[in-house]
Image (cartoon, rainbow, N blue to C red):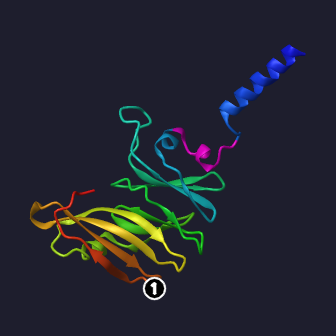
Amino acid sequence: MAAFRLLALAVLLLAAAAGPADAGAKARLPAPLAADCGSGVTGIGFTAYACGSGAGGTKYAHLAELVVLRTNGSYSGYRDSISEPDLRARSTTGEVVAAHNDAIVQVTASALKTLVSQRRLDQLFPGSPGLAAINALTVTASGAVLFRANYYAPHKHGCGNIRAELTAGGRVKVLWRSATGLICG
């Protein structure tokens, strides 16, 4: 009987180490992507992941991308020039909003829809040579998207930030603007 208990304990320990048979949506991502993707944000019929570039120098090397894994197991990858893993789910509709290629997009199971383009964001910080990053995305219960945009300052004097709101009606309002000279990123 002691040998049986020891065998049962060993089987339980092995099962616990292996984890559940379906450890969630991330378990269905291709192995190279699963290693470089953060935790996903679930939308209606999909989970969105911001995946960093990784596995350099191997056959699994890949660029940064936004991956949409559908509940049926299929997925789409949207290449990203800059990996920005700051995703937030819209609580009122189950949609996901993401920073992607210096724009703010709405993610669905079948497509990305641009909510605010890079060109429109560049106009929010006059005189800047360009956008450095989008971060701190938050979606309010009313459907407005709050975000922080980090801009390169003119004349190579560091960076500046703005805090802005994309209203549910599609208007962008700057709520706060920093001085320049801050660290970029």
Amino acid of disc 1: Gly
- Identify the residue at the far right of this view: 1
User: Which portion, as a residue range, is magenta?
Assistant: 22-31
Residue 163 belongs to magenta span: no
Residue 152 position within the rendered picture, expressed as x and y whole percent measured from the top left: 20, 63
* Drawn side of residue 178 relative to residue 140, left or right: left
Label 1 sits on residue = 169
* Drawn side of residue 54 relative to residue 8, left or right: left
Between 145 and 81, the residue placed more toward the observer is 145
Query: Where on the picture, by quarter, is residue 124?
Result: bottom left
Q: From the viewer's perspective, is residue 80 above or below residue 90?
A: above
Residue 178 position within the rendered picture, expressed as x and y whole percent measured from the top left: 23, 71
Residue positioned 15% across, 73% down in the render: 127
Residue positioned 39% across, 56% down in the render: 84
Residue 97 position within the rendered picture, expressed as x and y whole percent measured from the top left: 48, 67
Q: From the viewer's perspective, is residue 167 above or below residue 119?
A: below
Residue 44 position within the rendered picture, expressed as x and y whole percent measured from the top left: 62, 65
Q: Secondary structure at mark 1?
A: loop
Query: Where on the picture, by quarter, is residue 4?
Result: top right
Residue positioned 41% across, 47% down in the render: 52
Query: Where on the picture, by quarter, is residue 8?
Result: top right
Q: Residues within 10 Å of mark 1 (few under 14, many from 20)?
A: few
Between 133 and 140, the residue placed more toward the observer is 140
Q: From the viewer's perspective, is residue 13 above or below residue 155?
A: above
